[in-house]
Amino acid sequence: MSDVAVIGAGYVGLTTAACLAHLGHRVVAADIDADRVERLNRGEIPIHEDGLPELVTEGLESGRLRFVVGASVAIPDAEFVFLCVPTPQGDDGAADLSFVERVVREIAEHLRPGSVVINKSTMPVGSTRTVQRILSEEGASIDEIGVASNPEFLREGTSVRDFLQASRVVVGCDNPATAVRVSELYAGVRAPIVVTDPASAEMIKYASNAFLATKISFMNAVANLCEAVGADVNEVALGMGYDPRIGFEFLQPGPGYGGSCFPKDTAALMHTARRAEADFPLLQGVIDGNREQHDRMVAKARRLAGGSLAGVDVGVWGLTFKANTDDVRDSPAVYIVGRLLEEGAIIRAYDPAARPDAVDLPGLTRADSALEAAKGVGLLVVLTEWDEFRWIDHTDLADAVLVKRILDTRNVLDAVGLRRRGWEYEGVGR
């Protein structure tokens, strides 16, 4: 059992803190939002994440988890300090490390000798060195304070499972003994441990997300080609997925990738490539293709509406960037809704998890159910793959809408069944 401090109680920090407490460590998690800290200490979880409320409650009741205001308050007794603070995308695509720098300067004088500062947030290649430099500038002894990279591979909606049933744990550190100490924190997790140098650990995270984004953009391009030649992308993806070299994951076409990771991480990796004067046209193509996919969905909606969206009542199902999360950051759904509004559509949207105040688009009306969103519309657009949309009764849906037209950007609905019932249905690549 180790004493651990987690700085930042967002998606990554909260999951990291709760899971480490579940593994038996004593964890103090810090955040700058006093109201958030108060609610967390009452077991109130501010994000939609399967299994997380139960783990937080378990940690609080066992005494192994508590939340405090301020990084310096959390770390005096900590053997390990996880940095889980935001690294937002800057105007040039680079990750903004100002939050990281601010926290490191705050904690430097409070770190106990022998402790290890661990970069958990996604940070650019070279960030471990940056943290070491800042600690040194603030008077901390690098001989006494270790620094390591331990990137997260958590998917929103399944982050607890991804932590406790990890596919791998990556530790980047120049000091083998420090790397072993960090690895031992995961003794209760049955996963391969990859110990490497800091730069390689940081690159592993960016390269992993960039590769997954590439699969998404590739399948969207295949879907567009399927439409041109009369093939069904779902059948193509099925046939591809059985090849173990390819696999089934991330072969589903859609409106493009989004969320807090893929757009930011692909942009940051491109910035790294430009700074290193290394050509990376494949990744630039992935990024450009993703933007173009958003635009294709808008064009599909316009075409289904008869050539113009002006004055058309449109029902929207889904606002989050994917199902099983309440996160709308860089959501293709939100981008597409914004574009539809710009073209004059009148939109009523439903999402089972997105908070009422999460999407600030003038003219957007929120509905309390999928059928309410569809009531009286001339076009229904599915933008997020929530399971409840798959099981909507087609008769009830037909009774709700004014015109039976659907744009299913996630291919979640029964295209054959809807077309038999007289719907004008359009998916992606089918």
Image: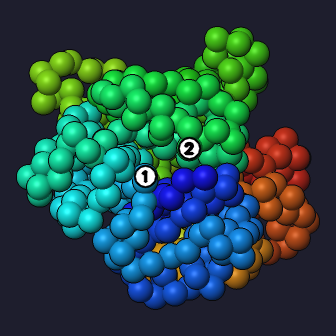
Q: Disc 2 residue type?
A: Leu
The local secondary structure at tag 1 comes to strand
Instruction: Find disc 2 in the rendering and name its residue.
Output: 185
Considering only vertical position in the picture, is 43 above or below 215?
A: below
> Which quarter shows the C terminus?
top right
Crowd tier of the residue under label 2, counting other residues whose Cα lies within 10 Å: few below 14, some 14–19, many 20 or above: some
The local secondary structure at tag 2 comes to loop
Q: Quadrant of residue 61?
A: bottom right
Image coordinates for residue 248, horizontal then vertical, percent = 70, 26
Image coordinates for residue 133, horizontal then vertical, percent = 13, 44
At horizontal 64% and vertical 16% (from top left) the residue drawn is 246
At horizontal 40% and vertical 70% (from top left) the residue drawn is 74
Label 1 – label 2 distance at C-alpha: 9 Å
Asked whether the residues under the numbered discs 1 and 2 touch, taking CB atoms below 8 Å apart as contact, a structural biologist would say yes
Q: Nearer the viewer, residue 240 or 62?
A: 62
Would you say residue 261 is visible in this rendering?
A: yes
Instruction: Find disc 1 in the rendering and name its residue.
Output: 80
Residue 326 tag number: none
